[in-house]
Amino acid sequence: MSKIISIGTSVPAHCHQQMDILKFMQIVYATTEAEKRKLRYLYQQSGIQQRYSVISDYNKPLEEWKFYPQSENLEPFPNLEQRMGIFNKQAPLLSVDAIRNCLGHVHDSKKITHLITVSCTGMSAPGLDLQVLELMDMEKNIFRTSINFMGCYAAIHALKIADALCKDSPAQVLIVCTELCTLHFQREATIDNITSSLLFADGSAAVLVCSDDNKNEGLHLDNFYSEVIPKGKRDMAWELSSNGFLMTLSGYVPDLIEEDFERIVNSTLQKDKISKEEVSHWCIHPGGKRVLEAIHKSLNFTNGQLSNSYKVLNEFGNLSSATILFVLKEMLHQKKAIKKMLGAAFGPGLTVETFTAHY
């Protein structure tokens, strides 16, 4: 058995109010007053108050843009090389901030035995894992691996790997999930692009997972369960292009989750041989307001079980893989009350990853 000892988070310097981002999006996406009104309605109903980005342009007037060309058609549009240039500079710094927040003055980076880096918004070689290793002055012979392009559920997949590593031998596994989603803004006014631009943001989260014999108290990881919903494989996708990464995010995703989530939760609970009523805390990835509403309806919630997920969505937006760790960090403030936790996140496939844990 393994346990989560500590979680740390970090966000970029640029905090954008959701309604300020709207003004940027209206310049790009809305050519008529009717389109501007529709876009304003979507932003008002998003459940998001603010988001963070490594790009400053999103809350500035056109004449102050620095990353995007100061033209309404955004020509010449930033290419993949430009976007990855920013990722390679900013992602390591953001990762290190999250790691230092996680380790604090209590845990020694030299004692980390395994490093897992997670991202679906940037890749290079040498990559984020080596950049983090160097900046944190970790041991050069550390076990390291990377999880790329799994999307929003990747943090749970990383926890699953960390748990397996801790079962083999005494270990201290550091996971860092860093996503710069806003680098991949696309100008075509498709429903996928408009939805992505409405939801996603930048941030990093780091988590320290140790073997159960570690003397520090922590959240014990009990079981994991994952399942692919094949009928949704075309409804959520993430592909590379010369102009950045392209998101497919169908409006049917909340409906698919609502239809299948209770069944998947029951499969998760069967592994623990417990009932839904025995779950005291629900750590759910806030993929969007409609996704949370679908889960609320699917599980017949009535008493604020998803309040932490709504809070993270409101304050940070959707940070892809890092988001569920932001939610988990919020919940660990109530650690003494956590009798049994069930966590879940969703991503391309359509894939659902879950875990159970207790304090």
Image (cartoon, rainbow, N blue to C red):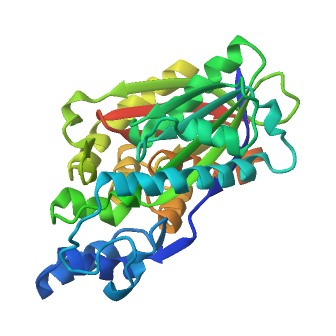
Q: Position of residue 189 (x, y in %)?
A: 16, 66
Report if residue 18 is visible in the image.
no
Q: Residue extending furthest top?
A: 168
Q: Is residue 177 above or below residue 164?
A: below
- Viewer-nearest residue: 192 or 298: 192
- Viewer-nearest residue: 185 or 139: 139
Measuring 36% from the left and 50% from the top, which residue is drawn there? Answer: 297
Q: Position of residue 90 (x, y in %)?
A: 54, 57
Report if residue 307 is visible in the image.
yes
The picture quadrant where one finds residue 278 is top right
Q: 193 left or right of 54?
A: left
Q: Is residue 128 above or below residue 101?
A: above
Measuring 83% from the left and 36% from the top, which residue is drawn there? Answer: 217
Q: Quadrant of the N terminus?
A: top right
Q: Is residue 350 above or below residue 168?
A: below
Q: 74 left or right of 158?
A: left
Q: 318 left or right of 44?
A: right
The picture quadrant where one finds residue 182 is bottom left
Q: Position of residue 4 (x, y in %)?
A: 71, 36
